[in-house]
Image (cartoon, rainbow, N blue to C red):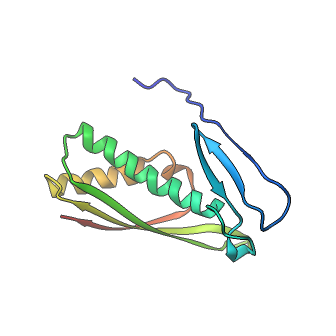
Amino acid sequence: MISYPLSFSGNATSLEGIKTSWSCSASEHQINCAVPKEFDGSGDGLSPEDIYLLALQNCLIGTFKVYAHYSKLNFSKIEVKSELIVDLDENKKPCMKKIFFHIDILEASDSKKAQIILKKALDNGFILQSVKTEIIPVITIS
């Protein structure tokens, strides 16, 4: 049984300079981060936009896996290829406008059940439901 509230923590430190990458960590895992080339940075690490995309993508995968496990749905693999669109909002401020998920679920033991569980994961993933970004799934189940 999960007991709420849950707490997650991380840290990051960087030296000055738009081209200077930095290290950040969470849950004892460390990654290298950088301002992306699109914003005149070095692109020598994951950008905040990359991490945002990965958070949404992996929320979907993790939620699907939990629901599939408890629903006794077997599958050989779930693969999600994502594209994040950063654009201007109605106030002309940059925002994470849309994310396209190209989702492939391979060798599902029950295609209809896989479709239902995937919709449930898209509708209920904690992080997915915490953002304003439009989520556009393209789904293939075999």
Name the residue rendered at 72%, 55% in the picture: 22
* Quadrant into which the C terminus falls: bottom left
Task: Name the residue at 13% across, 52% down.
Answer: 109
Q: Residue furthest right?
A: 16
Residue 30 in view of the camera: yes
122 and 104: which one is in front? Answer: 104
The residue at the point 75 percent across, 75 percent down is 40
**Where, quadrant-wise, is the N terminus in this rendering?**
top left
> Could one spot residue 132 in this view of the protein?
no
Relative image position of residue 132 (x, y in whole percent):
58, 59
Q: Is residue 136 left or right of residue 76?
A: right
Viewer-proximal residue among 3 and 13: 13
Name the image quarter holding residue 107: bottom left
From what the image shows, is residue 40 above or below residue 62? below
Query: Which residue is nearer to you in this view: 64 or 28?
Result: 28
- Residue 133 location, x and y as percent? 55, 62
**Vertical comparison of 52 with 138: above or below:** above
Left or right, residue 101 beside residue 71: right
- Which quadrant of the figure has residue 70? top left
Q: At which x and y percent is residue 54?
A: 51, 57
**Number of marks drawn:** 0
Residue at image location 58% in from the left, 69% down from the top: 97
Where is residue 57, by image quadrant? bottom left
Image: 136 above or below 38? above
Say whether residue 99 is left or right of residue 48. Answer: left
